[in-house]
């Protein structure tokens, strides 16, 4: 059993360090939602986020601009990391329960 306990403890440590890195990376990405609206024949990019309890919408520029594409990828990255962080946190909670059952 000591071998299994050490493996579980190593996994716990690995997940904790992964969780800390993910939190730092999420903090470096912009918050909010990215949207594209059509006006006439053109498409324009916007970012919506909360500031002091209110929803703020910022105009980014044409949807195909470099800034809009970069912002869209960063917001998507943040959303992906947030869902992965949720799974990692659930795994950490499961391991905590396993380690404390003894």
Image (cartoon, grey):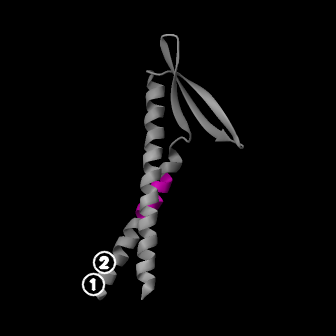
**Range of magenta residues:** 16-24
Disc 1 is placed on an element classified as helix
Residue at 52% from the left image edge and 10% from the top image edge: 40
Residue at 46% from the left image edge and 64% from the top image edge: 89
Q: Position of residue 62 (x, y in %)?
A: 50, 19
22 on left or right of 7: right
* Magenta segment includes 19: yes
Q: Taking 21 as reference, is 12 above or below it? A: below
Q: Residues within 10 Å of mark 2 (few under 14, many from 20)?
A: few
* Most foreground residue, 26 or 76: 76
Question: Which label number is shown at residue 7?
Answer: 2
Return the residue at label 1.
Answer: 3
Residue at 39% from the left image edge and 72% from the top image edge: 12
Q: Taking 85 as reference, is 2 above or below it? A: below
Total count of labels: 2
Principal secondary structure, stretch drawn in magenta: helix
Q: Position of residue 68 (x, y in %)?
A: 48, 27
Q: Taking 89 as reference, is 53 above or below it? A: above
Q: CA distance from mark 2 to mark 1?
A: 6 Å
Q: Which quadrant holds residue 76?
A: top left
Residue at 45% from the left image edge and 21% from the top image edge: 65
Name, please, the residue furthest toward the top: 40
Residue 16 seen anywhere in this rendered image of the structure: no
* Magenta segment includes 92: no
Q: Which quadrant holds residue 95?
A: bottom left
Instruction: Tell me if label 2 and label 1 are in contact, CB under 8 Å.
Output: yes
Q: Position of residue 83 (x, y in %)?
A: 45, 52
Q: Quadrant of the C terminus?
A: bottom left
């Amino acid at each position: 059993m000591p071998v299994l306990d050490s493996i579980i403890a190593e996994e716990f440590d690995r997940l904790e360090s992964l969780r800390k890195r993910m939190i730092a990376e999420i903090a470096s990405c912009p918050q909010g939602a990215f949207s594209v609206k059509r006006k006439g024949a053109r498409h324009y990019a916007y970012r919506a986020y909360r500031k002091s309890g209110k929803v703020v919408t910022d105009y980014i520029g044409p949807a195909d601009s470099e800034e809009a594409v970069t912002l869209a990828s960063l917001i998507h990255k943040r959303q992906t990391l947030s869902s992965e962080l949720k799974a990692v946190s659930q795994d950490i909670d499961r391991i905590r329960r396993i380690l404390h059952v003894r």
